[in-house]
Image (tube, grey):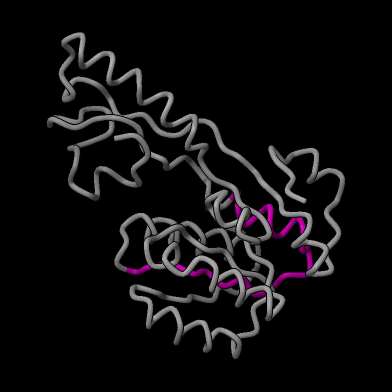
């Protein structure tokens, strides 16, 4: 595994410390990433009091993320709005319904459904002037506002060490699953300008990449 979500819930391993099967590697999950995304969004838009979450309820990793976000929004006094999308038709229908909820911002999870409609998602948010935080750099390159998530290039490099150990005779069941340790924060300055947002110098200094 080079960059999976939750290998335990997916049934790939018995536990992170003791995989116990013929699979091991690295999980893209990390501690408090959902909370960090919300905090960065709130830092940029202090007035945000209603934040929507776009997620697939059939995706185990998305459910973990939703639960973390629910707790974080409650702690920050933010109203939490759920936008479910387990299929493309769900995405289209529930996005239309999202406008009646009037969210100040949106956080989107990475999932095959949203990836398949990436440009449509970005266009919808842009046309309705909804700032959004994503988990993957690809969304920001396509025009999304910000992303905070695991560095996939780092995950793939680290996965090579597992390949080496296994080729040298180590058993996958004896190699603990590691979690992501390097995260990237990316801001699209062009999108921020189009939304009428001014990125504070303090946030730009935190960013690993600024897209213009």
Q: Position of residue 163 (x, y in %)?
A: 27, 20
Examine the image and state in which quarter residue 25 appears. top left
Residue at x-position 78% and y-position 61%: 192
* Left or right placement of residue 125 versus residue 53 in this view: right
Q: Position of residue 175 (x, y in %)?
A: 24, 21
Residue at coordinates 65% horizontally, 67% vertically from top-left? 77
186 or 64, which is in the foreground?
186
Q: Which residues are magenta?
A: 36-57
In the image, 176 versus 2, the foreground residue is 2
Q: Position of residue 199 (x, y in %)?
A: 83, 54
Residue 88: quadrant of the picture:
bottom left
In the image, taking residue 23 as reference, residue 86 lies left or right, namely right
| Image quarter hosting the N terminus | top left
The residue depicted at 77 percent of the width and 51 percent of the height is: 212
On the picture, is 179 further left or further right than 141?
left
Q: Is residue 55 magenta?
A: yes
């Amino acid at each position: 595994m080079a960059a999976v979500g939750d290998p335990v819930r997916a049934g790939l391993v018995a536990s992170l410390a003791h995989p116990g099967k013929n699979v091991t590697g690295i999980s893209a999950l990390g501690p408090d990433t959902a909370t960090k995304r919300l905090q960065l969004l709130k830092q940029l838009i202090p007035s945000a009091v209603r934040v929507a979450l776009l997620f697939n309820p059939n995706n185990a990793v998305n459910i973990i993320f939703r639960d973390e976000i629910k707790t974080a929004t409650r702690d920050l006094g933010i109203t939490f709005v759920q936008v479910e999308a387990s299929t493309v038709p769900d995405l289209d229908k529930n996005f239309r319904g999202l406008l009646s909820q009037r969210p100040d911002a949106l956080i989107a999870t990475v999932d095959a459904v949203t990836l398949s409609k990436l440009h449509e998602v970005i266009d919808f948010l842009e046309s309705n002037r909804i700032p959004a935080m994503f988990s993957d750099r690809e969304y920001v390159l396509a025009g999304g506002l910000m992303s905070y998530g695991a560095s996939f290039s780092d995950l793939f490099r680290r996965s090579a060490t597992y390949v080496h150990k296994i080729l040298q005779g180590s058993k996958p069941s004896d190699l603990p699953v590691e979690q992501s340790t390097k995260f990237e924060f990316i801001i699209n300055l062009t999108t921020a300008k189009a939304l009428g947002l001014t990125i504070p110098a303090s946030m730009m200094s935190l960013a690993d990449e600024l897209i213009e």
